[in-house]
Amino acid sequence: MKAGEQTALITGAASGIGLATARIFARSGAKTILTDINSAAGEAAAQALRDEGCDALFIGMDVCDQASIDAAKKKALEWAGKITTVVSVAGWGKTQPFVENTPEFWKQVVDINFYGPIMVIRTFLDEMIERNEGRIITVASDAGRVGSMGETVYSGAKGGIIAFSKSLAREMARFQITVNCVCPGPTDTPLMAAVPERIQEAFIRVTPLRRLGKPEEIADAIFYFSRPEAGFVTGQVLSVSGGLTMAG
Ligand SMILES: NC(=O)c1ccc[n+]([C@@H]2O[C@H](COP(=O)([O-])OP(=O)(O)OC[C@H]3O[C@@H](n4cnc5c(N)ncnc54)[C@H](O)[C@@H]3O)[C@@H](O)[C@H]2O)c1
């Protein structure tokens, strides 16, 4: 499918990596649906893209709530006719020693980072299967490949997304639907701004390219997997992390 024929739905599109992703899709000519729980920021981002002449719409959607996902799907299909690309970016975490985590915290982390993406992707698959085309792009984390101090349950959820993406890629290949996963390393977003400065400095010290990533750099990798050039690429995991991990 050509860039201009894409209709992309992005979760977590009101901020950081999701917002950068929405901008690259919209500016490429794709019909772009920004979704998030933060309606004020999401509406403002979509309006700014429309002001540039892009085809963009914001729909409020909580990835942890099936009714909210179903309602968003209805609105998205009414507006766009079809969704060719789903990008699952929404996620959340907090650095804290595992032994200090509460079971409520585990549940919140797993719901947002693992169960939520599963619900969103499952919801949009039927139309893709019917049309025999589609691109699913998940955003995990290098924490899910090699672990991360103080992010133990988050790492487990992100590792789950990596394995889920690979298995789904196998199941969906016969419908010409590709599934790929992008793993950011430490990236300069509002989520990172909440990480204590000494931990941010430690991240930079262990990153061979010696800086945080920019949200646009992660978005470029996500966009690649949606491109016609990536039509023969599925089940792959791409780290965009300044060399932090060099997983085989
Ligand atoms: N920033 C980093 O260093 C980094 C590193 C590795 C992975 N990641 C992953 O990248 C993704 C984006 O992170 P970011 O840094 O841009 O974060 P961010 O906090 O800037 O943006 C995340 C967005 O997700 C939205 N969101 C949160 N819960 C939601 C829910 N239940 N339903 C819908 N939307 C929800 C938030 O409102 C926010 O707009 C996340 O999956 C994160 O785990 C980030």
Image: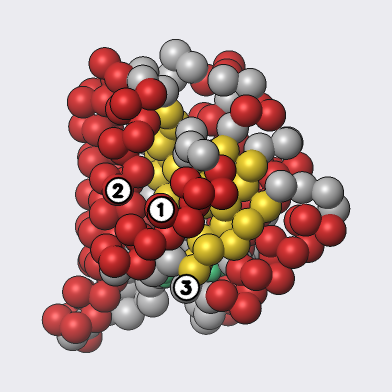
Residue drawn at x 71%, y 47% is 55
Asked if residue 247 lies left or right of residue 111, the reply is right
Furthest residue toward front? 78
Q: Residues within 10 Å of mark 3 (few under 14, many from 20)?
A: some
Looking at the rendered structure, the kind of residue marked 1 is: Lys
- Residue 92 in view: yes
Asked if residue 220 lies left or right of residue 185, the reply is right
Disc on res. 37:
3
Determine the CA span between mark 1 and mark 3. 15 Å
Furthest residue toward left? 103
Disc on res. 164:
none
Where residue 148 appears, as percent x and y from the top left, is: 34, 61
Q: Are marks 2 and 1 in contact (CB under 8 Å)?
A: yes
Asked if residue 121 lies left or right of residue 238, the reply is left
Where residue 204 appears, as percent x and y from the top left, is: 58, 60
Placement of 8 over or under 128, stated as above or below = below
Res 129 → quadrant: top left
Disc on res. 73:
1
Q: Considering the numbered disc 3 on the image, is that residue within a helix, a strand or a loop?
A: loop
Decide if ligand 1 comes within 8 Å of the CB at mark 3. yes
Determine the CA span between mark 2 and mark 1. 8 Å
Q: Considering the numbered disc 2 on the image, is that residue within a helix, a strand or a loop?
A: helix
Looking at the rendered structure, the kind of residue marked 3 is: Ile
Asked if residue 56 lies left or right of residue 105, the reply is right
In primary-sequence order, the first of circles 2 and 1 is: 1
